[in-house]
Image: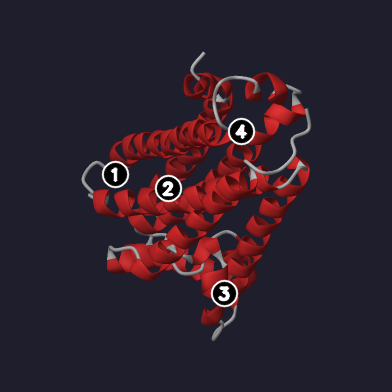
């Protein structure tokens, strides 16, 4: 069987359940927008002013205007990016390691294919899943936005947010893929990536609470393309696009250099 097609069949159930999660997140969130939109700007602003700054930072509400459609969706997108990162880590860490975990590596490696070709096919299958995740997110978001606010056009903001989501997911996916290919212990690679994600989240909260810590931004993936910047400037920062590409290349280099040379658990 073609390995690429085989891998595409392995995680479709995972994608299906995550799609339900996206539907619940976007549908539940946009369902609340109507009530907020109907409330007076003053009452909502007064309520937010009374909330601790740490609380607003933890829930991605620090620097966006919740009375606007783009600002409110930006808060939802904050959670979708976290969901996307977790999904990318699961796929990136598992798509290679499952052969050793399930004791199928020996069967795979006796086939007339090189380890590099195995990497390429598995990598491409995982990339398809990441793109599918973003595509499903975009479709669900577009439908709910048009249903809740048919007269408002935030199509460019939505497109840029989905693009930033895809970039962040590809970083997490490729680095997870690289660590999985380089390390013998799949659990270790997953824990490393989950720790990186956790640090990035906590660092994002700190940046939203404390001034003069902009130097932290290159270290925090969740701050590469902040929603407030997308809404205000309607563009993605080219510096962080380049930095994201660098992380992707490092992850891929790690996989393609280390995996063909290391011993496998057969």
Q: Quadrant of the C terminus?
A: top right
Characterize the local packing of mark 4: few (<14), some (14-19) or many (20 or more) Cα atoms within 10 angstroms.
many
Identify which residue is drawn at 29% across, 63% down: 235
First in residue order: circle 2 vs circle 3: 2
Describe residue 202's horizontal placement relative to residue 32 as left or right: right
Label annotation for residue 207 = 3
Q: Residue at x 62, y 73 (%)?
A: 206
Q: Secondary structure at mark 2?
A: helix
Q: Residue at x 62, y 69 (%)?
A: 203
What is the C-alpha distance between the residues marked 4 and 1? 40 Å
Q: Are marks 4 and 1 in contact (CB under 8 Å)?
A: no
Q: In front of the other: label 2 or label 4?
A: 4
- Find the distance from the CA under tag 3 to the CA under tag 1: 32 Å
Q: CA distance from mark 2 to mark 3?
A: 23 Å
Question: In front here: 125 or 142?
Answer: 125
> Would you name the residue on which mark 1 appears?
149
In front of the other: 134 or 58: 134
Residue with the mark numbered 2? 166
Q: Are marks 2 and 4 in contact (CB under 8 Å)?
A: no
Residue drawn 53% across the image and 48% down it: 174
Mark 2 or mark 4, which has the lower sequence index?
A: 4
Pointer 1: residues within 10 angstroms few (<14), some, or many (20+)? some
The location of residue 188, given as percent across then percent down, is: 77, 48
Dot 2 or dot 1: first in sequence order is: 1
Residue 61, can we see it? no
């Amino acid at each position: 069987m073609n390995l690429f097609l085989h891998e595409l069949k392995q995680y479709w159930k995972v994608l299906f359940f995550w799609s339900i999660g996206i539907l619940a997140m976007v549908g539940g969130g946009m369902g609340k927008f109507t009530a907020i939109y109907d409330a007076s700007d003053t009452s909502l602003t007064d309520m937010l002013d009374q909330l601790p700054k740490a609380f607003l930072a933890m829930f991605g509400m620090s620097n966006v205007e919740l009375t606007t459609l783009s600002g409110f969706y930006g808060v939802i997108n904050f959670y979708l990016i976290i969901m996307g990162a977790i999904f990318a880590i699961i796929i990136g860490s598992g798509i290679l390691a499952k052969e050793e975990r399930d004791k199928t590596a020996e069967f795979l490696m006796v086939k007339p294919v090189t380890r590099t070709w195995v990497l390429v096919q598995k990598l491409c299958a995982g990339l398809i899943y990441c793109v599918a995740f973003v595509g499903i997110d975009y479709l669900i978001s577009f439908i709910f936005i048009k249903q809740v606010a048919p007269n408002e056009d935030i199509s460019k903001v939505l497109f840029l947010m989905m693009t930033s989501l895809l970039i962040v997911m590809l970083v997490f996916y490729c680095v997870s893929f690289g660590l999985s290919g380089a390390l013998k212990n799949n659990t270790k690679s997953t824990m490393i990536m989950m720790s990186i994600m956790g640090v990035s989240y906590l660092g994002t909260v700190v940046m939203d609470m404390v001034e003069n810590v902009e130097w932290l931004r290159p270290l925090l993936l969740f701050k590469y393309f902040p929603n407030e910047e997308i809404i205000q400037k309607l563009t993605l920062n080219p510096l962080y696009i380049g930095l994201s590409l660098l992380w992707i290349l490092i992850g891929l280099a790690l996989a393609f250099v280390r995996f063909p040379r290391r011993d496998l658990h057969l």
